[in-house]
Image: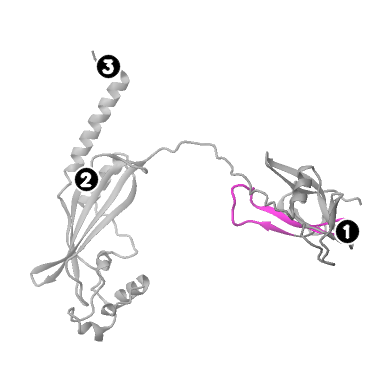
Amino acid sequence: MTVNTAANTAEAADGEAKAALLARLKEFEGVHSESGVVALDPVNGPMIRHWAETMGDTNPVYTDADFAKDTHFGGIVAPATMLQVWTMRGLQPAVANPDSPVQKLYDLVVEAGFGSVVATNCEQEYVRPLRLGEVVEFDQLIETVSEEKTTGLGTGHFITTLMNLFVRDGDERELVGTHRFRILRYTPHKKKAKEAKRPPRPRRVVNRDNQAFWDGIDEGKLLIQRCTNCQTLRLPFGPGCNKCASLEWDTIEAAGGGTIYSHVTMHYPKFAAFDMPYAVALVELDEGVRTLSNIEGIPHDEVRIGMRVQLEFVQHDADLKVPAFRPVEQEA
């Protein structure tokens, strides 16, 4: 027993519309869109030279007349892969011919909702090389129109055109190559709205030299290393004293006050884990050592050298706690 529902009816109507559209599209298969179109320029040395230089192709048969004349080509020839170059119409876009079968086909698929386009691939066949001075002309054929296909980009129809390229000798034309070009005319998939998830900030790099520093941060303390031989303070932590080279040390806890000695605003490169732009400052602690830190609680363009700041700790996630500084009002 078949139960007719609104969904079944809509699905059937959609299927009929697709079949009708495909039948109309298939009528274009095998239709010649253009015939005898003459290239704007003959095969010429400057265009060949620029192509060879761009591609890094140093074969002298493309640029050295003396060398090329002694080959079986009998003179300079164009690289085979330049085949499509001679058919291009220049930078100024041509006005579409509304009577062109290709244009009518494109208008039909756009009207059906397949307004986006992407080139998918091309295939070329080289019958013989083109020589200097030869003028290319071409015919264009609408070769195939596919059934409706669903791809990663969206749903639509693949349209393949075939261009046959000739060189004319009087009333005769000699085939020199073919160019098959395939595009997808499609309706993009609807993007699902999804909540952007911020990636985590970079992790702390902990080693045996700075382990005590990060242990202090986890306890809510900003520790400064102190040489037990000469009492010199140092930050960041290091294996030995920069003044007397002693390897013996202990720590003191910073009171937390300091002054911005210098600063920079980070604009690039952009990292999704950070709110860009942000200020990074070299803070001179009241104990006399300096440390790099983010400046919190103030726009990046209001950070100033000489500004008084106070230590605070920022817990970015369960595994990342770091020291930062926040401006404090100075007494008048």
Q: Where residue 256 sits in the image (x, y, percent)?
A: 84, 49
Pointer 1 local density, CA inside 10 Å: few below 14, some 14–19, many at least 20: some
Count residues near mark 2 (Cα–Cα under 10 Å), then give few for <14, some for 14-19, many for 20+: many
Whether residue 233 is visible to the viewer of this picture, yes or no, is: yes
Q: Are dots 2 and 3 in contact, CB under 8 Å?
A: no
Tell us which disc is closer to us: 2 or 1. Answer: 1
Quarter of the image where one finds residue 107: top left
Instruction: List the residue tagged with mark 3.
Output: 4
Q: Amino acid at mark 2?
A: Val
Q: Quadrant of the N terminus?
A: top left
Secondary structure category for the residue under label 2: strand
Q: Which residue is mark 2?
A: 145
Depth check: 112 or 64 in front?
64
Query: Earlier along the polypeptide chain: callout 3 or callout 1?
Result: 3
Q: CA distance from mark 2 to mark 3?
A: 33 Å
Residue contact between numbered discs 3 and 1, judged by CB atoms under 8 Å: no
Instruction: Kindly identify which residue carries mark 1.
Output: 228
Task: Provide the residue span drawn in magenta.
Answer: 263-290
